[in-house]
Amino acid sequence: MTALRSALAGLFLALLPLLPGAPRALAQVPDEVLVVGQIAEPASLDPAVSTATNDFRILINLYEGLVRYRPGTLEVEPALAESWTVSEDGRTYDFTLRQGVKFHDGTPFDSQAVKFNFDRMLDKSHPAAGTGPFPLSFFFSAVERVEAPDPRRVRFVLKEPFAPFLSNLAYPTGLIVSPAAVTARGKEFGRNPVGTGPFRFVEWQGGRQVTLDRFPDYWGEPAKLETVIFRPIADPNTRAAEMLSGGIDVMVEVPPDALAQFQSGGFQVHQQAGPHLWYLILNTRQGPLKDKRVRQAVNHAIDKAAIAENILQGTAIPAKGPIAPAFEWAHDPSLAGYPHDPEKARALIREAGAEGASLTFYVAEGGSGMLDPVAMGTAIQADLAEVGLNARIETYEWNTFLANVNPGLEGKADMAEMAWMTNDPDTLPYLTLRTDALPDKGGFNSGYYSNPELDRILEEARRSGDQGRRAELYRQAQRIIVEDAPWAFVAHWKQNAVTTEAVKGFALQPSFFLLLAGVSKE
């Protein structure tokens, strides 16, 4: 029956483009099938290899980790592990695993499977190490070793206390794959994924769709849908047209211009601010932005509210600092940030002797979480011109842009757009603002910012097992970062999606994942 439903769904999708004038009722997707329109084809369905949110939306339905984010939050709860304990020194995590869990290939999930997954990423001599590269394995760089005392117990021994460890386990990089499938498929595993999740992999038609079916032997509550199909539709206007015609049930990352047409007429619009920051990296090593006053002036010059409301048409909120409000326990709501104040910006520029300064501004043509980057860059250029700073924009394709920015801006640019989506308030400042995160040390501190007090605070925060203490440390860090202004803080993206009125139980998550096991169609 599963194969028949998949075949029928595939036939329907193949015929739909031949029926451009078909009425909406004819175009409806079968009730047991959910079709999701995504922005791109996945790069890989191996969670240890993947880095893109686009891919994560599929992975989270195929696989599970030891822990997961509780729906609607970024708080951790049990998943494949029933429970865990942490040693007093914060270095040893003991997990008790669920019994009777099977991978989609029928092999058992146990502690040896968990050990295989992390050894594959962290041990270069492991037999499956060649199935990488594993670009986000640094999430687990604090792990000294993984032990499997018995089939239901797995132990992680860390080199030092690392407070974000559980949160990192809930991230897709921590999802558990079938060792047998990895061993059999090698580097092709990413196109033949096997996990323990509520849906199992059926097929990947290159450039057309990825199909998942309900896993009948799932240990938990079975998925309500029989089949989920992820279709890559890169052009946002085409994606919107498919939604309007009934070719897809769910559309993610709706362009601001298209949102209005879905506000009525049988659709539901979903929006939620997540752990995202869109900002400008400022070159603190050389040029006009070496002076803190000019960096502060840049922040005051940018009309963030106008960008959020006009260019992004309400799909973002202005940013006041480096940590998103989605991290409720760590975000500092008292931060004033940098209100739009051109007069204050001009005064700071005069004080620094930087009137008429020229700035080279790197802008991406597009990319993960970049929020209409050319239009935003042009608006920022105009805001800077108003206060006497002449920004010259250089645009680059996304991968070329990263190749220019990640090694550092020295000798190339004064400022560059950037966007991050993170799972813990530690991740972004630790990887991008510490002195030891400079590009020549393997980090992403492309603007060369250095503050020993911030370094100390960030190191203490990731070692503390007391969330209240961590929260206070991150508030201290936010105040330092906002004052020093190594970035221009612009916006937090409100992720969005549109569903048809037939889709029930759908909700966006702060993690930016799509949890589809509880979704149905009526």
Image: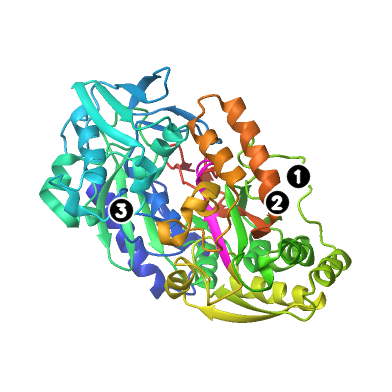
In the picture shown, does residue 436 fall above or below 383? above
Let me know if residue 329 appears in the view: no
Q: What crowding class fits label 1: few (fewer than 14 Cα within 10 Å), some (14-19), or many (20 or more)?
A: few
The dot on residue 49 is: 3
Residue 171 rendering spot, x and y as whole percentages: 42, 42
In the image, the segment drawn in magenta is 417-427
Q: Nearer the viewer, residue 178 or 426?
A: 426
Which quadrant of the figure has residue 132? bottom left
Q: Nearer the viewer, residue 23 or 137?
A: 137
Q: Which residue is mark 2?
A: 482
Figure disc tally: 3
Residue 188 rendering spot, x and y as whole percentages: 18, 57
Magenta region includes residue 421:
yes
The residue mark sitting in front, 2 or 3, is 2
What residue lies at 23% left-to-right and 57% top-to-bottom? 191
Q: What crowding class fits label 3: few (fewer than 14 Cα within 10 Å), some (14-19), or many (20 or more)?
A: many
What residue lies at 26% left-to-right and 45% top-to-bottom? 121
Q: Are marks 3 and 1 in contact (CB under 8 Å)?
A: no
Which kind of residue does numbered mark 2 sit on? Val
Q: Secondary structure at mark 3?
A: loop
**Distance in Å between CA atoms under marks 2 and 3:** 34 Å
Q: Which residue is mark 1?
A: 335
**Distance in Å between CA atoms under marks 3 and 1:** 37 Å
The residue mark sitting in front, 3 or 1, is 1
In the picture shown, does residue 464 fall above or below 185? above
